[in-house]
Image (spheres, rainbow, N blue to C red):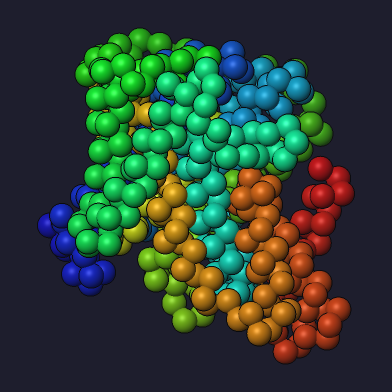
Amino acid sequence: MLEKFFKLKENGTNVKTEVMAGITTFMTMAYILVVNPDILQKAGMDKNAVLIATVLASFIGTALMAFLANYPFALAPGMGLNAYFAFTVVGNMGYSWQIALLAVFVEGLVFIVLSLTNVREAIFNAIPMTLKSAVSVGIGLFIAFIGLQDAKLIVSNASTLVSYQTFKGDTFRSVGIGAILALIGVFATAIFLIKKIKGGILYGILITWVLGIVCELIGIYVPNAEAGMYSVIPAGIVSFDFSSFGSTFGQVFKADFSAIDILDFIIIIFAFLFVDMFDTLGTLIGVASKADMLDRDGKLPRIKPALLADAIATSVGAVFGTSTTTTYVESASGVTEGGRTGLTAVVTGLLFLLALIFSPLFLSIPSFAIAPALIIVGFYMMGAVVKINFDDMSDAIPAFLCILFMPLAYSISEGIAIGVISWTLINLITGKAKEKKINIVMYILTVLFILKYIFL
């Protein structure tokens, strides 16, 4: 049945590989179960209710991706979008979280229309192959940078913005030990991959976690909540308390319309639309490139159902009570493990559902144990750099800028915006527009991106 539905042989994979890939994707995404409730709690939402909403939105979105598009991509509430939800819409603009959810719900409806009318597909296809390769590389650096931060190997610095961990001071027994364990995890994962051991990335996560547990038991690792370092020993295994879910479920339809300024509301929706659209397109480009899923013209087969799954998940997630649900770049970890079909996504989705019951166990996985997977996945995605023609500067310079801005601006969508603007303008001004056959959609995107920077 699995072979018939997911076409495993046709995609050069098997059940074992897909299951391992699905587990790996989930393990690298599990942090959202901790981070999303923590961020949305600051908007006044119930933390446990948001956890349940996060799980259900992730499960449904990932299942839709599996059954509508047969792709190994997983979905969950997006980082950055949840911060915009909590700190800008609710915090700075002063709207209730119910109104913010309504904006997310409307955004999802708009995306459903755009997905059915080929607008998002046209944008995907219009981006030249050079920029698609650059997006893959940029996402790789972005993921690796997130991993280094999660491990606290790279930390903030007042003079240089970022700096390397000092491995000394009062937090050594917490932050320092976690960083060292992350480094050990990177080396262990590298050895597994060099030895071609299937599931090497997953094993790297588990080994790092187990070493953390051992270090905590013998007193080498000491949890420090102020430093963001918590116990890695599970406080429990299962929990069946779902009573809080009612505080967020369906609240999107109870927003106070009289408190909404229409112009503000349109700007909020546009901001959600912009970031979600180009984060999703960037993720699909990057992960699909890594998996060699793009055809000769750089197009992704079955992109319409993939985008539709993403759009439906956004509106459904808003009904449950969470910010924008989107395709996750961490899907690259499962693809790296060999995941090629929707079966990988099904496994990931089921694990999200199980996390509802086994949340105490999953929530104890520390960020420094997930970090090695993100760093290694970043390495894998760097391989797309060889597809960029550095002899043609009109291609290479925009590609470089696209790559550069993703990690440094901490945004996939900003990297795409800079790449599109620079590629179009450089080729237009240097007289290469005819030679490159620039798609009209690229001109439209360039204008829209420039207007975005001027007015938003």
* Identity of the residue drawn at 40% across and 16% down: 223
Q: Is residue 397 visible?
A: yes
Q: Is residue 61 left or right of residue 4?
A: right
Q: Is residue 409 left or right of residue 146?
A: right
Which one is in front, 446 or 391? Answer: 391
- In which quadrant of the rendered image does the C terminus lie? top right
* Identity of the residue drawn at 73% across and 79% down: 394
Which one is in front, 342 or 13? Answer: 13
Picture quadrant where residue 289 is located: bottom left
Q: Is residue 319 visible?
A: no
* Identity of the residue drawn at 38% across and 17% down: 222
Residue 427 image position (x, y, % from top left):
78, 79
* Identity of the residue drawn at 26% across and 18% down: 218
- In which quadrant of the rendered image does the N terminus lie? bottom left
Picture quadrant where residue 260 is located: top right
Residue at the far front: name it.
168
Which one is in front, 87 or 451? Answer: 87
Residue 443 image position (x, y, % from top left):
77, 69
Residue 69 image position (x, y, % from top left):
37, 58
In the depicted structure, whether residue 299 falls above or below residue 79: below
Q: Is residue 223 left or right of residue 38?
A: left
Residue at the far left: name it.
1
Q: Is residue 216 left or right of residue 297?
A: left
In the depicted structure, whether residue 450 falls above or below residue 263: below
Which one is in front, 286 or 11? Answer: 286
